[in-house]
Amino acid sequence: MRLIARFAQEQEKFFEIITVYDKRTIIEHLNKKTPALISIAQDYPAAAWFERKITDDFGIEILYSNDKRHLVKHEHFPKDIFPMQKKYTKLSVSHEEEVSLSTNNHGVILRPTHPYLLESSQFQLFDKDQTILHFEMMPFYKYRGIEKMLEGLTLEEGTPIVERISATESIAYQTALLEIKLQASKKVLPEMLKKRHIFLLEFERILSHLSDLATLCQLVEFHDGSSFFDKLLELGREKMKELTGHRFGFNSIRLDNNTENIDNVYEFLFSLEKDLISFEKWIETKDNILKKMLLLGQISKKDAEAYGLVGLVARCSSINIDRRHDDNFYEKNDFYINLEEAGDTFSRFNIRITEIFTSLRVMRNLRTHEMLPFCMGTPVDGEYYSYVEASTGELMMYISLKKGIIDRFYVRDASFLNGLALSLAIKNSDVSTLGLIVKSIPLNISAIDL
Amino acid sequence: MLKLFKNKFPSGQLEKELLKDGELKRLDKELKKLIKKKFSSKLNLYILDAGSCSGCELELQALFNPLYNVSSIGIEVTYKIEDADILLITGLMTENMYLEAKDIYKKLKEPKRVITIGDCPLFQAPFKNTFALKDDGRNPFASEYAILGCPPEPRLIMRELLKYLKKLG
């Protein structure tokens, strides 16, 4: 079984641990006095981050765990508070004394503002003669407490927050939330609206891949390639704005979409396809550029399976996993999963181009100018899960609704799993290749940190 | 290589659509003049993400794409705070980032010039107070200017930067 997520929520008389696998969901109840949970990290290495977060959030002890370090709480965050417990209602963590930044004398710390990162996070690495022996990502510097922020809000009140968890995946998050709203109001989205939303989701994926391709080209010193993708990205953002009113598509997964500008966007998409075909032919002649990525930062299929990796990182290690494959709508519209075998940086570069072609092929079938009014209805209390294949990979969202308001919000971005994969990809690599490997793995730190 | 690149790519549409319009040309000219006069032709920006959705960072990054290309007028990003002329702060100030941010602010040379980017540092955008934010998440450091938007688009950032530079003595 593949581990999808493991998280906790508090009920009146007990804590509930929800472990979601691809084939089933297991729920455990823990008493509130001395809550303790048996670790599954030996069988599922990816469980380590989930379990460390459960401890930091709820104060639940993890038994038989080899890694009891804090994940969410950094240097000066008080360790004796468990902010996701219902009884914790303070709006700030108080400090009795000023604590200074700690230093680690045993390795190299790339602080949260390191140039390898666009967003704030921290990497720690240990090297010998320029070979990286151990590498680890320390997330949660940007921890905004979004799970708690959403508690007590209605689904509608929470929507602007959810769509701003991560700008680059805003449409995916909006889509996941809409799916939960639909489940809660027992409605099915009309096909023409679904067409529109999938169109936008694929458009977001294309923009995300273009952005990554530009960065990867820059890191292999292929500046013309970087400039080429940057131009396409800029044009794409402007087309997204024409279509949705926003360059990142905020507030675009709506029930009353305007389809006026869709023809202009199709013109852009057709020209993008032609440009990418030419790019593919051209880069085939650039052995020196390709060599820099070949066999670099490899992740084996075995490791990818063991860590439950998702998204293009998994697909590059020939794991046949893509949430779109489970959706008949995609299947009807010419979708099939793209796979690579080598699991290296070049595969992750190449698959982004292939996946853009796949998105374009699907989008070709989604052209519609029709619109019908559609109302959502009142949400019914319950527990709801949704899954979306975002640009970084599988996104899982969970919402428990009580009396019409959000009692628990949890989301697991693909980056949460991909963050763990970094250590696999980077181990034994040369320090000089670090940036290239890091950027080949889709990481969305704001979505990990929440 | 550039010649080969151009020959191989049917990028006619790209070149046409990415041409700078009149406003961008004017912004380039005026910014370049002010940067030359007030910062000896090179303005170093340091970007501090205090807890953003990454939208602001991506729009700041877009300033360096072939359309806006602010490098050509002397604007650069530095990763050494000691070299920065202006500190740009994006996002909500999280509890976990606060000490790092404080350290960076302390190292910013005098006069300490800080500009906040986006709605979050000023009024939280749609976010709400939580334990994970430093106080209410708004920028805790003295700032001279705010560029609003969620996120502000590259063109707007250029317009506002020009206004700010004009105000500087």
Image (tube, coloured by chain):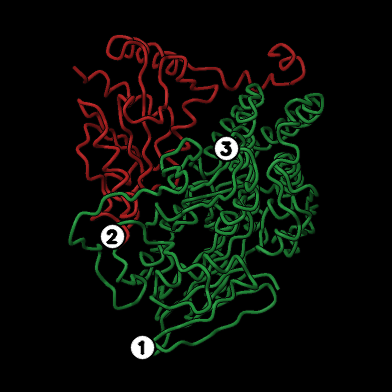
Residue at which label 3 appears:
A435
Please name whichever residue, A80 or B42, is drawn nearer the observer in this view of the structure. A80
Q: Amino acid under label 2?
A: Asn
Horizontal and vertical percent position of residue A172: 57, 55
SS state under label 2: loop
Q: Is residue A234 above or below residue B95?
A: above
* Camera-nearest label, 3 or 2: 3
Q: Residue at x 72, y 27 (%)?
A: A289
- Report the disc number at residue B1: none
Quarter assignment of residue A373: bottom right
Residue located at (36% from left, 69% from top): A153
Left or right side of A187 for A267? right
Write the residue at 33% across / 51% down.
A102
- Numbered badge on residue A33: 1
Name the spot of residue A261 as percent of width and height, x first: 59, 39
Q: Chain letter of disc 3?
A: A
Which amino acid type is shown beneath numbered disc 3? Gly
Residue assigned mark 2:
B129
- Label 2 – label 1 distance at C-alpha: 29 Å
Q: Quadrant of the C terminus of chain B?
A: top left
Q: Give the chain ID for the red colour.
A: B
Kind of element beneath mark 3: helix
Query: In this rendering, would B123 be left or right of A68?
Result: left
Return the x and y of residue A1 as percentages of the image width and height.
Answer: 71, 73
Where A356 falls versus A447 (above or below)?
A: above
Number of marks: 3
